[in-house]
Amino acid sequence: MAEGTGYVNRGPDPRVDGVAGKIAGGTQRALSFYSETPPKVAAIQLKDGGHIAVAWPPFFSVFVSRGDGRYRSFRIGWRYDVNWGDGNNPNEPKRETPGGYIADVIVKGNIDKVVAP
């Protein structure tokens, strides 16, 4: 686990560690911001249950079925997280009104569900 790297609202997923992790986490924190306003999203639903989507602030998301009930995904940009700052993550301060945009690059080859853009 990439402890002490500065990643925003870090969960259990693996992250880049070491010096590169400190740079990536610090950059993510510097580029992320709190907001109560959800993104504007345009999405094309794919027949396999996946999607191709773009959002504002800039975010691009692709989920494609692997054919076995799981998905491959690629997401880049400012991901909206309605729970950021809700007090459930001990590494983040609790905010009166949670939510915000987290700068992210996410690549997963084996995910069990499609995540809304």
Image: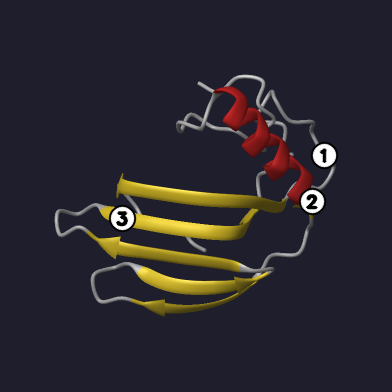
Could you say which disc has been placed on residue 95 in the image?
Answer: 1
Left or right of 116, for residue 49: left
Tell me the SS state at disc 2: strand
Measure how far apart labels 2 and 3 are at the Cα level: 28 Å
Whether residue 88 is visible: yes
Could you say which disc has been placed on residue 70 in the image?
Answer: none
Where is residue 14, by image quadrant? top left
Measure how far apart labels 1 and 3 are at the Cα level: 33 Å
Circle 2 residue: 34
Q: Are marks 1 and 2 in contact (CB under 8 Å)?
A: yes
Question: Of marks 2 and 3, which one's residue comes earlier in the chain?
Answer: 2
Quick one: 88 or 80, which is closer to the camera?
A: 80
Quick one: 80 or 31, which is closer to the camera?
A: 31
Circle 3 residue: 72
Quick one: 96 or 107, which is closer to the camera?
A: 107
Residue at 54% from the left image edge and 74% from the top image edge: 54
Whether residue 114 is visible: no
Question: Of marks 1 and 3, which one's residue comes earlier in the chain?
Answer: 3
Nearer mark to the viewer, of 1 and 3: 3
Measure how far apart labels 1 and 2 are at the Cα level: 9 Å
Q: In this view, which residue lies farthest toward the right?
A: 96
